């Protein structure tokens, strides 16, 4: 019998008020049920928000270093449970075990970083323009944070949001993706075990339309952090504007790797294989476009095809597997539809381009890693986010043309240039319109202590990761202390004629 999971609200594990449930299945073997989860609704969200609001009044008064100490315990517990968490994650979303171990490690890194930030929520002291007066600005908690996360990094991305929110003194109502609820539950179990008080973190499972919208639209939710598609992000922004709540959006990408003729070709090949087909291409930072200089295009493509065709598909828990399944049937069909579109627009499939039907692969939502050549910059497969193992190869003649093609998208998340020419490297760093640029590395590989996010329709300007996320989860409060004993009027008394 499948394991039954529950919501966690006000320190208690509870079913959905309606009693409804949904199943979570293994995308590598759809016959395997990972567990059943509460199919929650607006009433469940209401109870969770009330609990978070009550808990905020005490949690905000806990010294930030003490809040950080709890996050240190969270990191320690994640280290102990790393292999267990990684295997659970592979079962429910498909990426290979080496990658899910990395996903957990990113959460561990984020926990330890957040723990230390509890002692570094720096404010500012500045001179007053008046005598016997003291000026400072300090960070204060905001309130209840709504956290809505995707399925592709079901441990790392929730930790990017929840840990800073807690260190800053906020409480949390957490809606994880319905494709990865078991990993999210395991994270909340660890938070509770580490000593997070009841009501400070609440998890409510269910669909975006029921649970997500109820969180975003609620008057008592003060800020929302969302990672997902640009289309959904725009709707969240519209809904949140009704109450003027703070919103952080980390959305889509159409990332490109450029390769110049002077590049280390082996390194560039390794980079694009990892960037395009790691996590089965299901990353917002995935290398979806490969821009090759015309001088090396043909030889690079020939070697790339050999390497792609050698990638082994299968269950990510098994040794020797390079690429796991798409997360569900819908995603698999989306990939197939874009392959059809690419062919209709005149591009050529030189590797992959089909759903495998052989052996165990037929039991899951697998798709052969796919490479298109002859792609034009205005083709849909060069413009639209596919979120699957599809790579579009585009030829260019000069660095300037390559950068122009790279920038020709509504997105601006990650980018990559392979070259040994330092002048070209710094020109690209200056001119590429993206939140992240790698030189001689793939478009994936963000580190927990660095800002993460993009420009254009990849987001709304906020950054997760590193020190910058603490600006989002805290409010600046300006304080003036006048100890002169008399009325002093700034800009009036200090500059009289």
Image: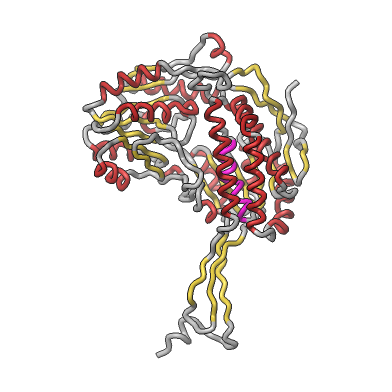
Q: Residue at x 62, y 22 (%)?
A: 26
Is 371 part of what is drawn in magenta?
no
Expressed as whole percent of the image width and height from the top left, the position of residue 127 reads 48, 76
Residue 397, percent across and down?
21, 32
Q: Position of residue 131 (x, y in %)?
A: 50, 84
Is residue 110 rendered to the left or right of residue 297? right
Q: Is residue 47 above or below residue 99?
A: below
Query: As rendered, which of 480 and 244 lies closer to the eye?
Result: 480
Does residue 76 appear anywhere in the picture? yes
Residue 88 placement (x, y as % from top left): 64, 28
* Prevailing SS of the magenta stretch: helix
Vertically, is 187 above or below 51?
A: above
Looking at the image, which residue is at 74% across and 31% down? 20
What range is drawn magenta here? Answer: 155-168
- Extreme-top residue of the structure: 359
Q: Nearer the viewer, residue 188 or 99?
A: 99
């Amino acid at each position: 019998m499948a394991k039954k999971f529950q919501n966690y609200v006000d320190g208690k594990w509870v079913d959905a008020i309606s009693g409804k449930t949904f199943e979570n299945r293994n995308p590598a073997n759809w016959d395997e049920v990972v567990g059943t989860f509460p199919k929650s609704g607006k009433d469940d969200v209401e109870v969770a928000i009330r609990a978070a609001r009550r808990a905020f009044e005490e949690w905000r008064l806990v010294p930030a270093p003490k809040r950080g100490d709890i996050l240190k315990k969270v990191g320690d517990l994640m280290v102990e449970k790393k292999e267990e968490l990684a295997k659970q994650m592979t079962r429910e979303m498909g990426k290979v075990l080496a990658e899910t171990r990395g996903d957990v490690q990113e959460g561990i890194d984020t926990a330890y970083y957040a723990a230390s930030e509890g002692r570094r929520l720096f404010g500012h002291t500045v001179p007053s323009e008046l005598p016997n007066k003291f000026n400072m600005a300090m960070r204060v908690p905001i309130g209840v944070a709504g956290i809505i996360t995707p399925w592709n990094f079901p441990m790392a991305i929730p930790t990017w949001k929840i840990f800073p929110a807690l260190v800053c003194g906020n409480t949390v109502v957490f809606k994880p993706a319905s494709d990865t609820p078991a990993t999210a539950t395991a994270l909340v179990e660890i938070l509770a075990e580490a000593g997070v008080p009841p009501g400070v973190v609440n998890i409510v499972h269910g669909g975006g339309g029921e649970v997500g919208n109820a969180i975003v639209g609620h008057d008592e939710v003060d800020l929302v952090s969302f990672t997902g598609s640009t289309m959904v992000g725009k709707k969240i922004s519209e809904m949140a504007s009704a109450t003027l709540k703070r919103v952080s959006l980390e959305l889509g990408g159409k990332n490109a790797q450029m390769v110049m003729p002077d590049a280390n070709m082996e390194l560039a090949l390794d980079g694009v294989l990892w960037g395009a087909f790691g996590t089965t291409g299901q990353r917002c930072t995935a290398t979806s476009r490969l821009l090759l200089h015309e001088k090396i295009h043909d030889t690079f493509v020939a070697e790339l095809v050999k390497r792609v065709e050698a990638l082994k598909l299968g269950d990510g828990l098994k040794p020797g597997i390079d690429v796991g399944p798409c997360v569900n049937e819908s995603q698999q069909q989306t990939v197939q539809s874009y392959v059809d579109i690419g062919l209709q627009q005149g591009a050529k499939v030189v590797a992959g381009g089909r759903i495998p039907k052989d052996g165990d692969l037929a039991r899951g939502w697998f798709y052969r890693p796919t490479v298109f050549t002859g792609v034009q910059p205005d083709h849909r497969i060069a413009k639209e986010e596919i979120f699957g193992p599809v790579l579009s190869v585009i030829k260019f003649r000069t660095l300037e043309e390559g950068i122009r093609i790279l920038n020709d998208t509504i997105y601006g998340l990650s980018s990559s240039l392979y070259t040994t020419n330092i002048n070209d490297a710094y020109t690209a760093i200056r001119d590429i319109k993206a939140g992240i640029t790698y030189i001689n590395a793939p478009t994936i590989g963000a580190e927990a202590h660095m800002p993460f996010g993009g420009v254009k329709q990849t987001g709304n300007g906020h950054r997760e990761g590193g020190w910058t996320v603490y600006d989002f989860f805290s409010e600046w409060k300006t304080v003036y202390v006048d100890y002169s004993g008399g009325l002093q009027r700034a800009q009036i008394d200090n500059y009289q004629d």
